[in-house]
């Protein structure tokens, strides 16, 4: 056992042999990019001592196989997700007549105002989660997440997309037309493909009974063909980027720095290699789209059974979901039981556990704090709970009560005034004046995203027993990027001072109120002595749904005197103005962009850098939640911006993470050879912490 270095990266290793943990002298250990089942990937990545502890426990305990898979239904609002889920689960249960089930579901969907069971959302409203024992004999359970098709839920839905799940993309075939392929199918594949590496997708076409046989065949073929086209186009685009980076790496660095016209001007070899590795990663982790579209109708029992059998066969395919066949240590099973059979706890703990609460349960199960992480990651991946190991603030929480967490989140994505008022007016003792006041609050919420804390408490009535419960839930919503406190007091507020919360995803007005900006003029209207600094992020495939609203919350601690529009924020960092703008794509071939800008005179340009750097870093951190997202970063030419050029020259964003070149004071703008740009307008005074585009 004198081995000290072991590199097994990029092989097809699924199981490490018994006694592997005895290689205690190995200090350099690389095991990435292997389909590991036993021990799990999460354990192997931590190193040899963890592998030893895991193998030791397996040898001395009664291991068990618990086949369980997270199944996520996604698609447009009227795609038929709810009906499909109910048909599958009914087929497996009491075999209710499918025709009557379809009729009942249609009837329910038409009456969103009718009361539901204990705090449940009306059918087809919001996100739902439930267990489905799809095969009792083999004990295979799906944990089914049905996502909402309504864009109002964009700000929270990405939290429910995770690796290791089976995704079912649902399309309404009776309503489908080829011209609407992108919003019906292509968009969802881009969304999923940018969030989940190697996402496994099964395509299902609902309402098949409403299509003639030839129409059905043509629509299924069209979807299949357009998916192949989109995948080919995206992969070719990424391959050509790899080629461009290769060509740049083939040049001498000094040559790259001598010509502003060169692709990747001034970018270091280290940053280029990192960029190439990122593009390769995107290419190697494309979605796995399993089949042509499966036509489905609840009225056809054969189609229902066929889909159920298809889902089971995909789930049990060892090459697609190797982890389903993982043998679990006893301590992991005990940990799960302890999380879900915990005694009656305070209200907040019924919604989530703190990391320390979870660690205490781990100790009871025989798991030390450092080994708890792997077990929680497994429970997250199988859909049993939510645990965001990579998230700086959310990793303090373990969400074990998913239906209640989802009920809370659904409330704040509900844009129906009637439903919101129904929740607020459920108390029969509310007088007319109070009713009018609550109407005004709902109007303000749906227009400007503003709500006082006492109204939030009313909306969350079943989940809140005390002021402390309310405070904890508001803190959670803030960490998830749903809202921020507009008037957070530095000390205990005076009697009657209400805390107000802003939910950016509800802001309706396109442009912020002018009074918050310098004399109501924006950056392009400033006098000529002012230099402009603008960092632009471009998203050629997709702009992550809900990203702008969540980013708007994340930057709140960095800015003052802010004013929000739907796609723009005017604010100050100290006394320095900043503006954050989102520009949706203007055409099919145009990217969406998000820019962060400021301005100052040239001698004071460091203040503008100081103002925007923390905002750039916050965005970089947020984008790390999208490991397979393709985006680019550029520093726009100050001279072009000053000229009002509609297409300013863009310097590579990698320069933000590099020191300023020695002895260089000016750079030529390639768009206008006679203009020279001061290096202080392209390079920050000190390099940013996270290199843009690094994964």
Image (spheres, helix red, strand yellow):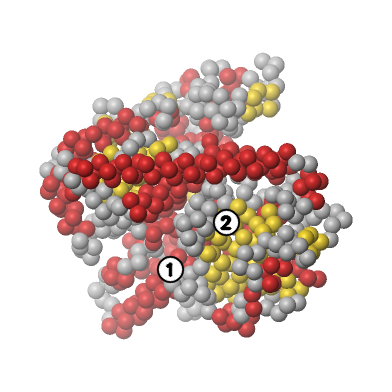
Q: Can you say whether 587 is above or below 95 in the image? A: below
Q: Can you say whether 639 is above or below 335 in the image? A: below
Residue 301: quadrant of the picture: top left
The image shows residue 77 at horizontal and vertical percentages of 31, 56
Labelled disc at residue 506? 1
Q: Can you say whether 290 is above or below 695 in the image? A: above
Asked whether 518 or 140 is in front, the reply is 518
Outermost residue, front side: 673
Mark 2 to mark 1: distance in Å? 24 Å
Labelled disc at residue 389? none
SS category of the residue bearing label 1: helix
Q: Residues within 10 Å of mark 1 (few under 14, many from 20)?
A: many
Question: Is the C-beta separation of discs 2 and 1 under 8 Å?
Answer: no
Residue 527: quadrant of the picture: bottom right
Q: Residues within 10 Å of mark 2 (few under 14, many from 20)?
A: many
Q: Residue at x 42, y 57 (%)?
A: 154
Q: Residue at x 59, y 82 (%)?
A: 520
Q: Quadrant of the N terminus?
A: top right
Labelled disc at residue 538? 2
Asked whether 345 or 514 is in front, the reply is 514
The image shows residue 439 at horizontal and vertical percentages of 33, 78
Asked whether 32 or 364 is in front, the reply is 32
How many marks overall? Answer: 2
């Amino acid at each position: 056992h004198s081995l000290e270095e072991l590199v097994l990266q990029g092989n097809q290793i699924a199981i490490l042999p018994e006694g592997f943990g005895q290689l205690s002298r190995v200090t350099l250990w690389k095991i990435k990019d292997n389909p590991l089942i036993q021990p799990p990937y999460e354990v192997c990545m931590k190193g040899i001592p963890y592998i030893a502890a895991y193998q030791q426990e397996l040898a001395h305990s009664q291991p068990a196989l618990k086949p369980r898979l997270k199944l996520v239904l996604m698609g447009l609002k009227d795609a038929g997700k709810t009906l499909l889920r109910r048909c599958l689960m009914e087929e497996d249960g009491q075999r209710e007549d499918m025709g009557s089930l379809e009729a009942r579901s249609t009837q329910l969907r038409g009456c969103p105002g009718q009361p539901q069971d204990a705090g449940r959302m009306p059918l087809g409203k919001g996100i739902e989660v439930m267990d489905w024992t799809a095969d009792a004999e083999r004990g295979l359970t799906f944990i089914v997440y049905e996502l909402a098709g309504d864009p109002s839920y964009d700000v929270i839905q990405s939290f429910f997309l995770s690796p290791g799940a089976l995704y079912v993309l649902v399309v309404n075939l009776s309503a489908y037309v080829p011209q609407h392929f992108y919003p019906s199918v292509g968009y969802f594949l881009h969304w999923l493909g940018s969030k989940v590496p190697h996402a496994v997708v099964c395509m299902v076409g609902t309402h098949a009974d409403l299509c003639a046989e030839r129409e059905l065949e043509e629509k299924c073929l069209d979807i299949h063909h357009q998916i192949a086209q989109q995948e080919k186009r995206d992969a070719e685009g990424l391959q050509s980027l790899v080629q461009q980076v290769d060509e740049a790496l083939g040049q001498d660095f000094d040559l790259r720095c001598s010509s502003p016209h060169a692709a990747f001007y001034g970018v270091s070899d280290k940053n280029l290699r990192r960029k190439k590795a990122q593009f390769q990663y995107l290419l190697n982790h494309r979605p796995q789209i399993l089949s042509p579209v499966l036509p489905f109708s609840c009225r056809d029992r054969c189609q229902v059974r066929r889909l159920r059998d298809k889902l089971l066969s995909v789930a049990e395919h060892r090459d697609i979901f190797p982890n389903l066949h993982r043998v679990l240590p006893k301590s992991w099973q005990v940990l799960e039981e302890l999380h879900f059979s915990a005694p009656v706890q305070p209200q907040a703990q019924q919604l989530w556990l703190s990391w320390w609460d979870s660690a205490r349960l781990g100790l009871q199960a025989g798991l030390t704090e450092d080994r708890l992480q792997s077990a929680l990651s497994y429970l997250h991946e199988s859909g049993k709970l939510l645990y965001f190991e990579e998230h700086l603030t959310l990793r303090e929480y373990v969400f074990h009560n998913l239906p209640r967490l989802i009920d809370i989140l659904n409330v704040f994505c509900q844009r129906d005034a009637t439903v919101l008022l129904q929740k607020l007016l459920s108390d029969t003792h509310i007088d007319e004046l109070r009713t009018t006041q609550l109407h005004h609050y709902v109007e303000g919420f749906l227009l400007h995203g503003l709500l006082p804390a006492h109204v939030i408490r009313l909306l969350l009535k079943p989940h809140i027993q005390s002021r402390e419960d309310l405070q904890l839930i508001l803190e959670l919503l803030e960490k998830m990027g749903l809202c921020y406190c507009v008037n957070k007091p530095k000390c205990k507020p005076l009697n009657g001072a209400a805390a107000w919360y802003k939910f950016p995803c509800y802001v309706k007005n396109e442009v912020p109120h002018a009074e918050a900006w310098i004399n109501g003029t924006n950056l392009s209207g400033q006098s000529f002595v002012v230099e402009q600094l603008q960092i632009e992020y471009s998203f050629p495939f997709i702009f992550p749904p809900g990203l702008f609203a969540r980013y708007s919350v994340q930057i709140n601690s960095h800015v003052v005197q802010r004013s929000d529009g739907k796609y723009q924020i005017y604010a100050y960092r100290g006394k320095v103005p900043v503006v954050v703008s989102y520009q949706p794509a203007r055409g099919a071939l145009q990217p969406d962009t998000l820019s962060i800008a400021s301005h100052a005179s040239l001698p004071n340009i460091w203040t503008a850098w100081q103002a925007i750097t923390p905002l750039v870093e916050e965005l970089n951190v947020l984008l790390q939640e999208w490991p397979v997202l393709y985006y680019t970063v550029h520093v726009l030419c100050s001279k072009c911006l000053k000229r009002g050029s509609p297409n300013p020259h863009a310097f590579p964003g990698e320069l933000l993470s590099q020191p300023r070149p020695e002895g260089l004071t000016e750079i030529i703008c390639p768009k206008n050879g006679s203009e020279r740009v001061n290096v202080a307008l392209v390079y920050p005074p000190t390099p940013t912490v996270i290199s843009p585009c690094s994964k």
